[in-house]
Amino acid sequence: MKKTRQGAALVMVAAAAMAMGGLGNGVASAAPAPVASIPDLTGVSTSVALDSGFVSALQSLNVAPSPSGNATVKDGVASFPITGGNVTVYKPGEVDPYVQGSIEHQGSGLKLTKGATVVQLDNFVVDPGKPATLSGRVQAGGKVVAPSTVLFDLDGSTLKPITTDAAAGTATLTGTTVKLSDGAAKALNGAFETDALKGGTTIGIATIVVALPGHMKQMPAGGVATGGGSTAGPEHIGLITGGSAAVLFAAAIGFMAIRRRGTVRTSTDSDNR
């Protein structure tokens, strides 16, 4: 099917959503209705192909990464099972951000070990909001240092088109660049007594595989670099079901990251003028 470029997902969502009412005669409008909603997102996994530069930096510091809980690390790829979450998709412009929810990865994470010092990052939660982030719990020496804090920033400018596997009932989004947050860099530098780790350092490239609830007869077309979606007219409205909501949710992580990146760039350009 033909891949579309910028605005494809927005067109589909806009075509599918209808206003719930307006202000008139002093009567408040009804709350916007979501285009689609998945109250209980489960399966399959988020994996990160660890960047060789990041791995080399850890090695130079004598810090060894390893999986914790239900996570796995194999051939340079760290994988974390999706254990829950939810997603609600609104018409763009009615609610901001228009994609809300989370992808949860309870009971898995990464350990970073240097001698007797062990820092564990786990219970990851992907948030597609503004900005798009991955947060998690931080433990050091077996004690919880932070129950939930932003660990990584998500940059969707390198995303590839969404793919689906009808037989497996999954949708796959790959290409999001995972970067170390400023706060996480500061905390890790303190734990390992170094100043080598910097905010913005590329950790790796993420792949999110989500289970599609129900059955999708057709996948919404479109490039995920701008949020994925369909070329969309009213004839495609029926595609906005639980399954396609999962696709939109995954794609929106990249879209929000791209919008954040553009906002930051514009702000920086303005400051330089």
Image (cartoon, rainbow, N blue to C red):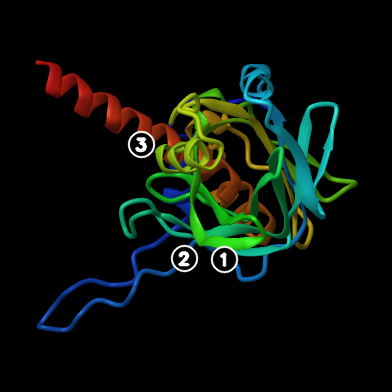
- Residue drawn 61% across the image and 20% down it: 57
Neighbour class for label 2 at 10 Å: few (<14), some, many (≥20)? Answer: some
Expressed as whole percent of the image width and height from the top left, the position of residue 214 reads 77, 62
Give 15 or 151, whichever is nearer the viewer: 151
Q: Earlier in the sequence, mark 3 or mark 1?
A: 1
Q: Secondary structure at mark 1?
A: strand
The image quarter containing residue 171 is top right
The image quarter containing residue 38 is bottom right
* Nearer mark to the viewer, of 3 and 1: 3
The image quarter containing residue 110 is top right
Question: Is residue 90 found left or right of 83 in the rendered image?
Answer: left
- In space, the residues marked 2 and 1 are separated at their CA atoms by 7 Å
- Of the numbered discs in the image, which one, if any, rests on residue 152? none
* Nearer mark to the viewer, of 3 and 2: 3
Q: Secondary structure at mark 3?
A: helix
* Circles 2 and 1 in contact, beta carbons < 8 Å: yes
In the picture of the structure, the residue carrying the numbered disc 3 is 260
Residue 255 is at least partly visible in this image: yes
In the picture of the structure, the residue carrying the numbered disc 2 is 34
Expressed as whole percent of the image width and height from the top left, the position of residue 82 reads 73, 56
Q: Earlier in the sequence, mark 3 or mark 2?
A: 2
- Residue drawn 63% across the image and 26% down it: 160
In the picture of the structure, the residue carrying the numbered disc 1 is 37
Q: Is residue 271 above or below residue 33?
A: above
- In space, the residues marked 3 and 2 are separated at their CA atoms by 23 Å
What type is the residue that disc 2 sits on? Pro
